[in-house]
Image: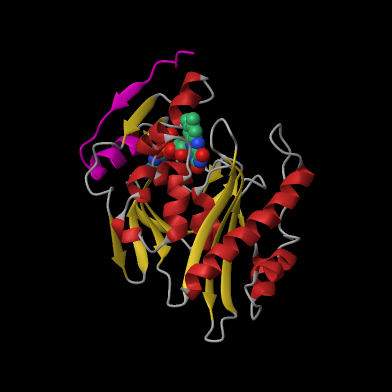
Amino acid sequence: MIPHEFEYFAPRSLKEALELLGKNADAKALGGGMSLIPALKHRLQTPAALVDLGRLPGLEAVAEKRGAFAIGGRMTHSALAASPELAGAHAVREAAAAIGDVQVRNRGTIGGSLVHADPAADWPAVFLAFDGEATVASARGERTIAASQFFTGMLQSAVRRDEVLTEVRLSVERSRTGSAYRKLRQAASGFAIVGVAASLTLDRRGRIERAAVGVTGVNPVPFRATALEKRLSGESPDAATLRRLCARIEEADPTEDLHASAEFRAHLVGVYAARALAAAAERAAA
Ligand SMILES: Cc1cc2nc3c(=O)[nH]c(=O)nc-3n(C[C@H](O)[C@H](O)[C@H](O)COP(=O)(O)OP(=O)(O)OC[C@H]3O[C@@H](n4cnc5c(N)ncnc54)[C@H](O)[C@@H]3O)c2cc1C
């Protein structure tokens, strides 16, 4: 379908972009367009103006700052999958590489994906498991949103229409820590039927000291499997123990669609949690 008419702005600075978003009450930010453009074409969204973030400087880099990876909000999935700075952050690179197809990865951005808050998107699981934070800017100033407060509903995030997500921060792994992202892909689009990001720290005896588990694709809103995280503390990370402890994920309240029944998703989330944790444990021990 053909989108309705809209004005198009291509600002060259963040300040200009924020002014445009602030003064045009019905304007929307345009990231890679991988979700927004299909929504325009189906007329699910009819903004009066698009403010293209593609020419803004300074939003496409990764740096390590104060114990966190600071990732520019306009970094594409492909750039993150190939980032040398993130070489040791396996879950981050695995999630980036597992998104959609080459074209989607080359255009789509981490900021756009998080703000769009698709319940089957991959980044939310990593953002939650790595105790993420996002910086958002508007004409009123900047604020920080913690991952735990970020996803407010299905396809809804805490980022307001006139705000630009400028930076995502993911905690840097400590020693004896490993991470992994494991997903069951929907065959046509690549979206997660179930996706689990795990970060796991071992103590000196090789037992689990801390685990963080982010889940996407299961509930309408991504979540941390906190009951499982507590249960894992002090346990051995062998495959049989992980399978037993992951058999039930208390926070899972699965949706049902043509790809998987709620019952199947409830089963899959345990299987993929155990797989992600096993891979993370192996890396933590290496
Ligand atoms: C065929 C196909 C397959 C896909 N497969 C997957 C998959 O397997 N896994 C997956 O996770 N995703 C998948 N996606 C979605 C893809 O990852 C998109 O990149 C992502 O959902 C949106 O990012 P974007 O940069 O394209 O944002 P846009 O589409 O440009 O924008 C999406 C929303 O975010 C807002 N926005 C964008 N950037 C910012 C910003 N910096 N600050 C504030 N607001 C912003 C826009 O206003 C809009 O509301 C797929 C998409 C397609 C078309």
Q: Who is closer to the viewer here, 38 or 50?
A: 38
Left or right of 97? Residue 21 is left
Q: Is residue 26 visible?
A: yes
Direction bottom: furthest residue:
205
Q: Residue at x 50, y 56 (%)?
A: 126
Q: Who is closer to the viewer here, 205 or 233?
A: 205
Q: Residue at x 52, y 47 (%)?
A: 122
Rendered location of residue 13, percent (x, y): 21, 42
Q: Is residue 2 magenta?
A: yes
Q: Is residue 31 visible?
A: no
Ligand 1: give its quadrant.
top left
The range drawn in magenta is 1-22
Q: Is residue 203 magenta?
A: no
Rendered location of residue 150, percent (x, y): 52, 53
- Picture quadrant of residue 190: top right
Left or right of 112? Residue 58 is left
Answer above or below: position of 77 versus 232: above
Left or right of 170? Residue 60 is left
Q: Residue at x 44, y 59 (%)?
A: 90
- Picture quadrant of residue 64: bottom left
Rendered location of residue 222, percent (x, y): 60, 51
Answer above or below: position of 230 versus 143: below
- Picture quadrant of residue 164: top left
Answer above or below: position of 82 versus 3: below
Snapshot colouring: secondary structure
